[in-house]
Image (cartoon, rainbow, N blue to C red):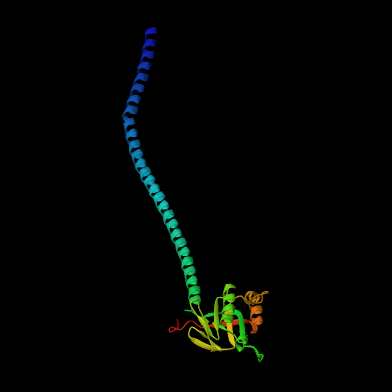
Amino acid sequence: MRVKGRSIILALVLLVSGFLVSFSYQQTKSDPEVVTLNESQWEKEYYYQQQLLSIEERNKQLRDELNQKREQIQQIENDLANSEDVVADLVDRKKKLQMLTGELPVEGPGVEVTLHDAEYIPDEENANNYIVHEAHVQKVINELLSSGAKAVSINGQRYFSDSYISCIGPVISVDGVQHPAPFVIKAIGEPDVLESSLNLTNGVVEKLVNDNVEVTMQKQRAITMEPRLATEG
């Protein structure tokens, strides 16, 4: 009975061992297929990941390029805006210079100053002491210009920086054009400033009155002065 029992135990051990060996062999045989399949999937996944990373990197480059282009466009727009401001400023300055030189007409408020010869001349006095001379006209013009007048005219004729005034008996000549009294001097500028400047104590008007020149002055809302003619100057 002991021998039989040992045989049975031995048979069971062999049976179990055989089963384990068979199972291990099946597992060993099937494992390479699983590994091979996983490698294939891993390779595909790796490939797709690389493609995705490449696309993301390209997208980042494109975004950076887009931002750079936007900054360049913004800079160009700013430069254009600055250029337009500069051009507009130059055009404005050019117009102002053209007005000063008489190339363009000038319009605006200002004052009108009229110089008259004295109505009464005593018999024993020299008549030259009671008429308007070029020096009187020049004093008025100089004061107006120093007070900010943009343009000045004498009896409708524009006065410029290179103009000259001379006296010929009872008339004065402006750039060769003769004008009799009364002399109407118009100036475009701030009316209050121009008027106050002429009426200062011991100022131009007071000196003219002391020289027997009759002076009338009034503010003007709108004065128009034509440009210099091509034949002038």
Q: Is any atom of residue 208 visible in this view? A: yes
Residue at the far right in the pictured view = 201
Viewer-proximal residue among 63 and 100 = 100
Viewer-proximal residue among 173 and 85 = 173
User: x and y percent of residue 231 in the render?
Assistant: 43, 84
**Residue 45 occupies quadrant:** top left
Q: Quadrant of the N terminus?
A: top left
**Residue 207 occupies quadrant:** bottom right
Q: Residue at x 38, y 43 (%)?
A: 49
Residue at the far front in the pictured view = 124
Q: Residue at x 39, y 50 (%)?
A: 61
Query: Left or right of 39: which side holds 161?
Result: right
Viewer-proximal residue among 143 and 76 = 143
Q: Residue at x 46, y 59 (%)?
A: 74
* Up-down relation of residue 102 to residue 56 (above or below): below
User: x and y percent of residue 195 in the render?
Assistant: 64, 77
Q: Is any atom of residue 1 visible in this view? A: no
* Up-down relation of residue 222 to residue 77 (above or below): below
User: x and y percent of residue 86 in the render?
Assistant: 47, 66
User: x and y percent of residue 42 in the render?
Assistant: 36, 38
Viewer-proximal residue among 209 and 169 = 169
* Up-down relation of residue 64 to residue 222 (above or below): above
Q: Quadrant of the C terminus?
A: bottom left
Instruction: Count how many numbered circles sit on residues in the image.
Output: 0
Residue at the far bottom in the pictured view = 123
